[in-house]
Each structure stands twice: as C-alpha cells, then as structure tokens.
Amino acid sequence: MLEKLFKHGLSPIIFAITLSIGLVAVNYVIAIKTPSFDVTKYKTNTLSKQTFKFLKDINFDVTIKAFYTSTSQRRISEILDKYTANCNHIKVELIDPIKNPVLAEKYDVKYPQTIIFEAKNNTTRINPPTSRYQQHGEREITLALYRLMTNQNKTIYFSTGHGELNIANTEYNGLSIIKKRLEEQNYIIETINLLEAEKVPDNCTLFIIPGPSVPFIEEEELKIKKYLDKEGSIFLMVNPGVETKLERLLTLYGLQYGNDFIYETSRKLTTERGPLYPLCEPKDKSEITDPLENQTFIFPFVRSINPIFLPQGITHINLIASSENSWAETDMEYVRRMKIGQKPVRDENEKKGPLAVAMVTEREFELPDSLATRDIHTFKVRSAFMGTANFISNEIVAGFQQNLNLFLNTVNWITRSEKVIDITPHATIFTPVELKPSERRMLNWLTLVIIPGTLLIAGVFIWYRRR
C-alpha cells in the first residue's frame, strides 16, 4: 500500500511543488528584475522630461525620509524609486512614524505623509496633504528638491483694498492654494494697500493685482507707474465689466481690455457650466506654455485683451486664446438676464474668435554703462495681463491642475525662475474607450459565453480521456 502511494502519489506532489516554485521565481523576475514600461498615452506613470533634466543638476547628496505608515508606503515608494533610479545622489528611507515615534519626534513629524529632505547645508519638508483625497506627487517632490538647490528670496506683492481676490481666503473664491504653491517655490508673499503705502516697495519682484472690483485712484496709479518705470513687473488680472482706472498704464504696453466677455459656442470647448466658462488653448509659442503639452485651460467669465499698437521696445506674446467658435459679446447686461434663459446673438461689429484672453509682454530698458557690454546694451522686463482673476481661485485650481500650472509658469517666467517653469508633470487626462454596440455585444459573448464555454468543453474532454 505504501509502495503504491509513493509510486503513484509522490510524482504529482513533486510536480505541484516544482510548478509552484517556478511560478514564484517567474513572478519575482517579472515584478522585481524586469524594467517597467509606461504604456499610457501621456506617460502619466513616468517622471516628466523636465524633472529628468532637473535631476541631472543635482550634484550633492540628498536623503529623503518619507514618514508613512506601513500600509500606505507602497505608492510613495513607487514614486521615490523613480528619483533614485535617475539620480545617484538621492537616498530614500521609508519610516513608519507609529513604529518609530522617537525618530518622528526628532524631525517634528506630527502626522503621517510628511516627507523630510536633507542635504549638507539645507533642509526642507513636505507637510501632509490638507485633504484625504490629495496625495503627494512628482510636482511636490521635485519642488522640494528645487528648494534645496536655491536660496531664492524673491518677494511677490498682492494688491489689496479694491475688492481683489484674497490670498488668505481658504474659501472657494480665495487664493490660498496659489499662495501655498508660491511659498513652496521659495517666494516671499506679501500684501500691500497702495492707499496706505508710500510706494510699491523696492524689494518687489512682481506686483500682482488679482481681480479688483473697484477703481484705483490717481495717486495709486502714479505709484504703480513709478514702479513700472523703474524696471518693475506687473501681473494684472481684470474681470469683465470692471473699470480699474489703470487703463493709461496699459497703454505703456500697447494693450487694451475689451468691454466684453467671451461667449463660446462649441460644446467641446466648454465645461458643464456652460458657454461663459470656455476652454482656451495656447496661441503663440512661449516658454510658459511649451512645457504644458496637451493641456487646455478654463477661463471662467473672461474678457478679451486687444493689442492696439506696438510701442517702441515692447514685445507682445498672445499667450492664451479662445477658439474660432467664440466671439466677444459686448452686451454686458446678458449676464443679468441669464436666469430667464436668454442667449446673446452675435452682432456684425462683435469680434469673432480666436480672441486673446491672456497676453504677456517684454519691455526693453537700457542697461547702465557699468553693466553694458559691446554686444548687450539693453535688458527686458516681463509682465502679464489676463482677462479674469477667477481662473486661479481655489474653486478652479482645485479641480483644474492645468490652470495652476499656467499661473505658476507665468510667474516663474516673469521672475526668470526658469528651472521652476520646467517642473511640470505629465497631465493626467481622462480618455475613455467608447465601444460601438456591436463591439459591446462581441465583448459580452467573448467573456460570458465563448471563453467559459471553451474551458468547460476542454475540461469535459480531459475528464473523458482520463476516464
């Protein structure tokens, strides 16, 4: 009896054990040793080419301590592994703050999902996401590495006192997300009320006016003009139907805001909010939008910006424009009548798209004799003008990452922080597969009938043969 058991029963057991060991070995090689390939259309699972380029500039040792619980370490480990694979100077440590409370206390880690970046002479960190639906990704990690490389202390001033969007406001119509992102890039953020201030401060790298709702007075306008004439940069965002009394400053740049708003007729280029929320695209080639491949930007209730002439020493760049299906509606009362379902009709004198909604400029100044060279006698100061400020409100940028990218890239272009401009991860774009009815029927037959039926028939055939 024992002899029969070994003769007829042992070989299947040995075969099963050998097969199991073989499967484990194959899976280990595939999962651990085989290089991975990103087959997504926009390479969303790969570090952006800009981050690859940035990592080559790191010539000092960096230790990244990721304080994540053991159950949540997998995703952040996969992201950080891409950095260590492409930069020999980066070392990663995954630490469970619950199992290592002493180490967590040493680095002042109060909550999981905190990441500490250490270099020889500098330290920075990424705090936990403010929402449980958010997760740290490529942008946050690369920007933290950027902070280790730079001692940048450029100061950006946001104007107040005219009903502007507030950088301290965390509600849907605030700019707290924008403020946080700028501070992550080592900008110093300040606010200023020109009615109370003597002038725009000398340390102002960029003066931002985010959607005023009441006019500036002449005294304030003169203060801004003096700042601009002393090689200052401005980022002006004015919503439709608002008069700022800064129109004379715009003539310095040969620009004029239209007394209108953009009305989009293409359903493909609007969101569910309708034709007053057009999706706009890059127009002229620029360092700002070139890294933002395959991205469109939502500009809620936006007015046009029109070049009226080209002053000497000024360069215009049509940054973002509406589609050819849009037009500049001049009936400003339409917005008040929206509730009763009225729709505007384009008049013959109303401009048809594409229409500029965001312009950037370069203004040429003479270099001092002490800095001028044989070939270089001038330098250019950059500024930006947009037909709405709502495109960077918390409500919009929280759901449209591309808007956030556009704003940050514009600021970094103006302040000449080119390395930060390049840190733009691949856009995650939802591209559903639409199946025809015949393809759906075929898929149902294949998964519910053909494959199960084939396996059933094969099983019956093998059973009959053995019998």
Image (spheres, rainbow, N blue to C red):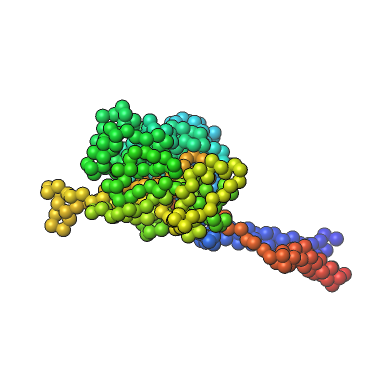
Q: Is residue 266 visible?
A: yes
Residue toward you, 171 or 325: 325
Q: Is residue 453 left or right of residue 275?
A: right
- Compared with 52, 149 (above or below) is above
Q: Identify the image quadrant of the C terminus.
A: bottom right
Residue toward you, 380 or 327: 327
Identified at 48% across, 60% down, the residue is 324
The location of residue 140, given as percent across then percent down, is: 44, 44
Identified at 60% across, 62% down, the residue is 26
Identified at 33% across, 43% down, the residue is 247
Residue toward you, 7 or 34: 34
The location of residue 435, given as percent across then percent down, is: 67, 63
- Compared with 378, 198 (above or below) is above
Q: Quadrant of residue 318?
A: bottom left
Q: Residue furthest bottom?
A: 465
Q: Is residue 451 left or right of residue 362?
A: right
- Compared with 125, 462 (above or below) is below
The location of residue 128, given as percent across then percent down, is: 49, 37
